[in-house]
Amino acid sequence: MSDKNSKEKRNQAAGQLLHPRNRHQGRYDFAELIKAEPALAPCLTHNPAGETTVDFADPLAVKLLNKALLRSNYGVRDWDIPPENLCPPVPGRADYLHYLADLLAGSNQGRIPKGRQVSALDIGTGASCIYPLLGNSEYGWSFCASDINAGSLANAQAILDRNPGLGAQIQLRHQTNAQSLFKNMVADDEWFDVSLCNPPFHSSAAEAQAGSMRKWENLKKTGNPDQTGPVLNFSGHDAELWCEGGELAFIKKMIVESATIPTKILWFSSLVSKSANLPAINAALKQVKVSDQKTIIMSQGNKESRLVAWTFLNTSQHAAWAKLRWSNNKK
């Protein structure tokens, strides 16, 4: 097992916040974004430095910003989510995918595998379907996107219906078993190159509400963040915001389940919001005897998060996997 987990380098040069391939370096070009989504214009304001921004405490402004970013940068038309669903920050979600691409490149002699032959499993895709939309646009990957909430999947399907062609590469699956993550989502005759997940953070509805109020108060005290600041949203239904035991329990369950299908997914992964959870996560990975694991630090403005990835396959098995599944990919 790799011993690099507690000493994993930050993967970024000093002062560089987003992944080098992330499209959202620097400040937003609001003139271009308004061309993509004219309804964004009335939401523009100025921060204390006099720079144009949006009110990140306004859920509608955040949603319209996302809609403009997806149209302008990724070619996704008419993206929308219900007001009760979480609105994901596009730059941060893109970072996760770019680091996963680097991870796959490490199994492929440094070349990022691209195209529909690369298959990803998104656990808890939500109403936004954000990871499949970004991953397909950036790398052409195919996605299986699962969720426990039928309403969220219906909204994700509506987004796909408004974007002809995406439906052939993004398949939605309803997880009807609330106690399972991978079960019934991975068929006997299919394999995935990577799995990804943004797990619910809080351990109860009350904790989620308290957390949202703290964020709201902090945002009011500090003023509007600039482009690299965290996009905050204070909506979200229960499955998105909390689960029993919170983020740590969710990820530990994912680790235990992953050990039941060790050869079906090359790299398992999850976002980890709270760094204090890493020791317990590393202990859980050691318990199931993974072959390798990595912790990758990601930064966006004053917000730091991390992704943890693990695999049960050894180096020679990774090479065989790449040859079998990506041999026609020369990029």
Image (cartoon, rainbow, N blue to C red):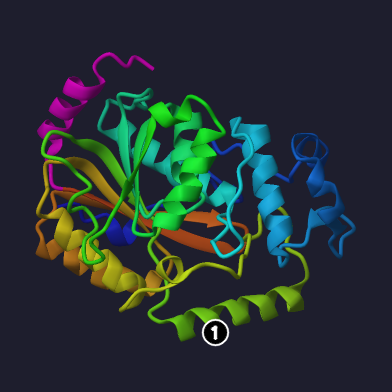
In which quadrant of the rendered image does the C terminus lie?
top left
Q: Vertically, is 106 above or below 54?
A: above
Image side of residue 42 versus residue 197, left or right: right
Residue 261 vs residue 48, the one in the foreground: 261
Q: Vertically, is 29 above or below 252?
A: above
Q: Is residue 64 visible?
A: yes
Q: Give me the residue at 39% from left, 29% from top.
A: 169
Q: Is residue 17 visible?
A: no
Element carrying mark 1: helix
> Residue 242 appears at what percent x and percent y?
41, 73
Image side of residue 11 versus residue 106, left or right: right
Image side of residue 270 versus residue 98, left or right: left
Q: Vertically, is 51 above or below 160?
A: below
Please rate how many residues cluster around mark 1, counting C-alpha atoms within 10 Å: few if below 14, some from 14 to 19, many from 20. Answer: few
Q: Amino acid at mark 1?
A: Ala
Query: Residue 253's quadrant in the figure?
Result: bottom left
> Residue 116 appears at what percent x and percent y?
35, 24
Q: Give me the residue at 10% from left, 60% from top.
A: 288
Whether residue 238 appears in magenta in the rendering, the answer is: no
> Residue 177 appears at what percent x and percent y?
23, 61
Q: Main secondary structure of the magenta part?
A: helix
Q: Vertically, is 148 above or below 326?
A: below
Whether residue 324 appears in magenta in the rendering, the answer is: yes
Q: Which residue is mark 1?
A: 210
Query: Residue 230's quadrant in the figure?
Result: bottom right
Magenta span: 312-331
> Residue 48 appears at what percent x and percent y?
86, 65
Image side of residue 42 versus residue 278, left or right: right
